[in-house]
């Protein structure tokens, strides 16, 4: 998974300026990896200047905005990425926390590079502390943060299963232990396996050009099946960004409309030059699968995957499954249904429904030779030039431990599936109600599986009276960016909406400050100047309230 460059830092020592200047080293524990940082401090006539480097992410050095060292306490601020640091000097190093968007991460700074053991031990048969997982899930449900299910397998057997938060759903929602979830792009991994079964049978070659099946697609003579499987085809993404893909929500649009869109969008680079995730590639791969078998996708899925290992709760949208969870979002005091894709528009790349147990059955069977040969599986997971994408299977690192699997997101559901061959351990997590960011939720559960220390997130559930929210309401525009922001009250809460984008709820964090953590957005209202400061993705924009 990709970690954004969010950091920044500084340093000082205790007695004389000469001791403060120089280089400090630290490792930011993101709770899924340790990210090395190098901070260089220079003494000036008044105070200090400092720079931050993150060698694993970039060769660029980043300036620190503000650095203070008083009473043995070091603090710094970097407004552009909404981050800060506070640490206390301890004999020869600083012990403190790096804070960004409300998330606190431990960070200690040393003069010399510490030979800390970054690796976490494999379980090697050690029992998982399931009580810690239960306690965490209970906490998240009590705070209206997450709804879903989790299953953990070891050596091919389920050792932990838990449904959480379903009782938070509206009273008319019915479900049982076999109710499935939309698993989004985990469908792609299953499609890739079925295509590689055809390769093993000699009915398809990885070097076959796309033009063999779809000559009308731009660059089809140069794009190969393998390019499409490993996201190096250059084909753009017909699904697009939220707000641009409403045409895929209301009804089935048909293959012809999607293919015409793929043709119109063209390519963004030549095959093999770059890696860029492409739903278009997997849409075409699924249709190629149907062309070769001369059968619909759901029949191919049933005969080549589901019936081989008794995945009784897994279906394609073409099966018209009924016992499926809808997606929900938390709006003020209750969970409301989210409008999602019409999954007929993403058959083979995002339409499959399943349960965490079935997903674990699938990935354990895959890694134990039930679907493809070992040489084929090795090819699927190996791509030395790419950190995350293989050929149908993604690498999902947790510190030194590499899981293999895939993630999946729809408009309102989120899933992840991973397998560690060393411990023969797999996990599947499905979410149909998200308030707390799902990636942070996955990382929390992995920390608990490996019995690591994990600090629970703190949630501010206080509500602000509507009368006090009125002062923030208005239309805002900026000279920094061609984008308008509308702030308004809805359902007794504060909402914001950027031009031509979906509205989103705001959570009060500090005085005149609100956040939308799912997108990493922070809004600071400067009421005396009728201004709004929006921070996201390391950039800050100033908006003025329109008169």
Image (cartoon, grey):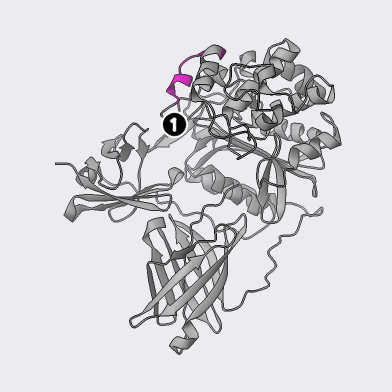
Quick one: 17 or 120, which is closer to the camera? Answer: 17
Q: Quadrant of residue 371?
A: top right
The residue lying at 43 percent from left, 75 percent from top is 74
- Measuring from the top left, give residue 340's x and y in whole percent: 49, 25
The residue lying at 44 percent from left, 51 percent from top is 459
Identify whether 418 is placed above or below 86: above
Where are the magenta residues, as a range? 245-255
The secondary structure that dominates the magenta segment is loop
User: Does residue 281 appear anywhere in the picture?
Assistant: yes
- Measuring from the top left, give residue 416's x and y in whole percent: 63, 38
Residue on which the image places disc 1: 242
As helix, strand or loop, the secondary structure at mark 1 comes to loop
Residue occupying the far top of the picture: 294
Quick one: 491 or 187, which is closer to the camera? Answer: 187
- Would residue 137 be found to the left or right of residue 525 on screen? right
User: Does residue 430 appear anywhere in the picture?
Assistant: no
Identify whether 61 is placed above or below 132: below
- Measuring from the top left, give residue 363's x and y in whole percent: 75, 35
Q: Quadrant of residue 114?
A: bottom right
Within 10 angstroms of label 1, few (less than 14), some, or many (20 or more) residues? few
- Quadrant that contains the C terminus: top left
Identify whether 207 is placed above or below 472: above
| Residue 246 is inside the magenta segment | yes
- Would residue 274 be found to the left or right of residue 241 on screen? right
Q: Quadrant of residue 159?
A: top right
């Amino acid at each position: 998974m990709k970690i954004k460059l969010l950091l920044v830092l500084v340093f000082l020592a205790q007695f004389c300026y000469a001791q403060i200047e120089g280089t400090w080293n630290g490792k930011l524990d993101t709770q899924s990896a340790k990210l090395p940082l190098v901070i260089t401090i220079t003494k000036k006539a008044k105070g200090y200047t400092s720079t931050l480097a993150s060698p694993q992410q970039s060769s660029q050095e980043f300036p620190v905005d503000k650095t203070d060292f008083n009473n043995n306490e070091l603090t710094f601020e970097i407004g552009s990425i909404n981050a800060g640091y506070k640490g206390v000097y301890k004999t020869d190093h600083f012990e403190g926390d790096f804070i960004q968007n409300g998330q606190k991460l431990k960070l200690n700074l040393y003069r010399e590079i510490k030979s800390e053991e970054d690796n976490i031990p494999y379980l090697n048969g050690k029992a998982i502390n399931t009580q810690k997982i239960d306690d965490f899930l209970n906490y998240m449900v009590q705070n209206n943060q997450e709804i879903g299910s989790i299953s953990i397998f070891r050596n091919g057997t389920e050792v932990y299963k838990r449904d959480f938060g379903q009782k938070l759903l509206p009273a008319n929602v019915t479900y049982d232990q076999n109710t499935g979830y939309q698993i989004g792009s985990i469908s792609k991994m299953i499609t890739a396996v079925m295509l590689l079964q055809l390769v093993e049978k000699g009915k398809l070659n990885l070097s076959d050009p796309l033009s063999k099946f779809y000559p009308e697609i731009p660059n089809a003579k140069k794009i190969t099946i393998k390019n499409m499987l490993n996201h190096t085809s250059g084909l753009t993404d017909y699904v697009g960004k939220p707000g641009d893909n409403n045409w895929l929500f209301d009804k089935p649009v048909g293959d012809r409309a999607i293919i015409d869109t793929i043709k119109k969008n063209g390519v963004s680079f030549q095959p093999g030059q770059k890696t860029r995730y492409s739903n278009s590639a997997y849409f075409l791969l699924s249709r190629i699968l149907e062309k070769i078998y001369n059968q619909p996708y759901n029949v191919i899925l049933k005969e080549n995957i589901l019936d081989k290992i008794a995945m009784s709760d897994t279906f394609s949208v073409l099966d018209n499954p009924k016992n499926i969870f809808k997606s929900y979002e938390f709006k003020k005091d209750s969970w409301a249904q989210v409008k999602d894709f019409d999954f007929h528009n993403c058959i083979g790349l995002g339409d499959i429904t399943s349960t965490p147990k079935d997903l674990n059955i699938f990935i354990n069977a895959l890694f134990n030779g039930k679907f493809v040969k070992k040489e084929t599986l090795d090819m699927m997971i190996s791509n030395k030039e790419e950190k995350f994408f293989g050929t149908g299977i993604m690498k999902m690192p947790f510190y030194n431990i590499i899981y293999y699997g895939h993630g999946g997101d729809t408009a309102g559901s989120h899933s992840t599936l991973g397998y560690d061959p060393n411990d023969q351990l797999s996990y599947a997590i499905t979410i149909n109600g998200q308030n707390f960011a799902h990636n942070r939720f996955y990382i929390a559960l992995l920390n608990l599986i490996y019995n690591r220390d994990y600090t629970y997130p703190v949630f501010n559930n206080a509500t602000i009276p509507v009368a006090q929210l009125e002062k923030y309401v208005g239309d805002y525009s900026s000279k920094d960016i061609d984008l308008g922001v509308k702030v308004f009250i809805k359902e007794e809460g504060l909402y914001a909406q950027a031009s031509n984008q979906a509205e989103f709820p705001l959570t009060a964090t500090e005085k005149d400050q609100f956040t939308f953590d799912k997108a990493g957005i922070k809004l600071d209202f400067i009421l005396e100047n009728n201004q709004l400061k929006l921070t996201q993705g390391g950039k800050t924009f100033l908006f003025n309230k329109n008169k």
